[in-house]
Amino acid sequence: MKTNSQLGSQNQMSLLANKIAFVTGAGSGIGRAGAIAMAQQGARVIVTDLDVQKSTQVANEILSQGHNATSYGLDVLDDIALKEIIDETVKTFGNIDILHSHAGYQTEGNLEEVSIEGMDLSWKLNVRSHFIASRAVVHHMRKQGGGSIIITASNSGIQYDREMIAYATTKHAVVAMTRQMAADYAKENIRFNALCPGFIDTPFNAGFEKQMGGRDQLEKYVSDTIPMGRWGSTEEVGQSIVFLASDMSSFMTGHALVIDGGECI
């Protein structure tokens, strides 16, 4: 006879059973953690990254744990390649249930310090690439009766960081776009939610580290300013991704899920 704890573990492991999850920017950090967490909950994960060696490494890590994954090299700024890989995923596996559009870019500086090229790249990666990815999957999800689209924004999308004009502007924009798409597709049972992490200890914090004058100053900021007094882990964000991907959040759409240890309070 199975104990309640065993039954709970079994149920938890089937949260994403037989689901197909497509992840961009999955070669490291939060993208990697989300891909692994979804695979551990039963999803077959399509792991993509600009660096094909990194996406292959993550897929192999998932496979070594006895789960399912396929890897591709993908530049999300290549509209045609992005659509082709999504279409190929549907052709191969029959559907696409989850999109985690994670790839992004950060550059520090105020209005006079950020280059025009830096602002343009921020827009292309932090907003436009999510538009293209969502556009590529939404008609497939409509045909299959629904799906979950998770777009990585930031808690910078609901507050304002000093001297981070390109990052804060584009993150606010992608939160707004996510909410608009949620309103447009709610009746189609396609859910759109924004993932808004705060200080998670990954190399992506290089811009903030430079802005604050080095790692020691960034560590001091996290310790002194974040109410919980610590960094978040990629694993913690990975579990939030599973929540948004699964039926645990089946009545949630248009939400900006903040995971920042209370920084925005």
Image: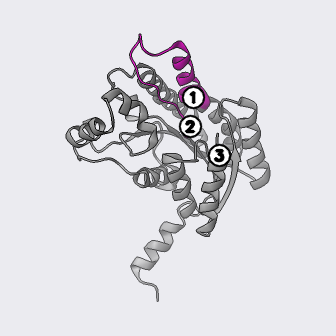
| Residue 217 x %, y % | 27, 35
- Does 123 appear above or below 4? above
Q: CA distance from mark 2 to mark 3?
A: 10 Å
Residue bearing the label numbered 1: 125
Given the image, on which type of amino acid does mark 3 rest? Thr
| Residue 235 x %, y % | 43, 55
What element does badge 1 sit on? helix
Q: Which mark is residue 51?
A: none
- 213 sits left or right of 135 in the view: left
User: Camera-side residue: 139 or 106?
Assistant: 106
Residue bearing the label numbered 3: 48
What element does badge 2 sit on? loop
- Magenta stretch: give its range: 102-129
| Residue 178 x %, y % | 51, 32
Please say if the residues under marks 2 and 1 sit with CB atoms less than 8 Å apart: yes
Given the image, on which type of amino acid does mark 1 rest? Leu
- Quadrant in the picture for the C terminus: top left
Circle 2 Cα neighbour tier, 10 Å, few/some/many (<14 / 14–19 / ≥20): many
Circle 3 Cα neighbour tier, 10 Å, few/some/many (<14 / 14–19 / ≥20): many
Residue bearing the label numbered 2: 103
**Residue 16 colored magenta?**
no
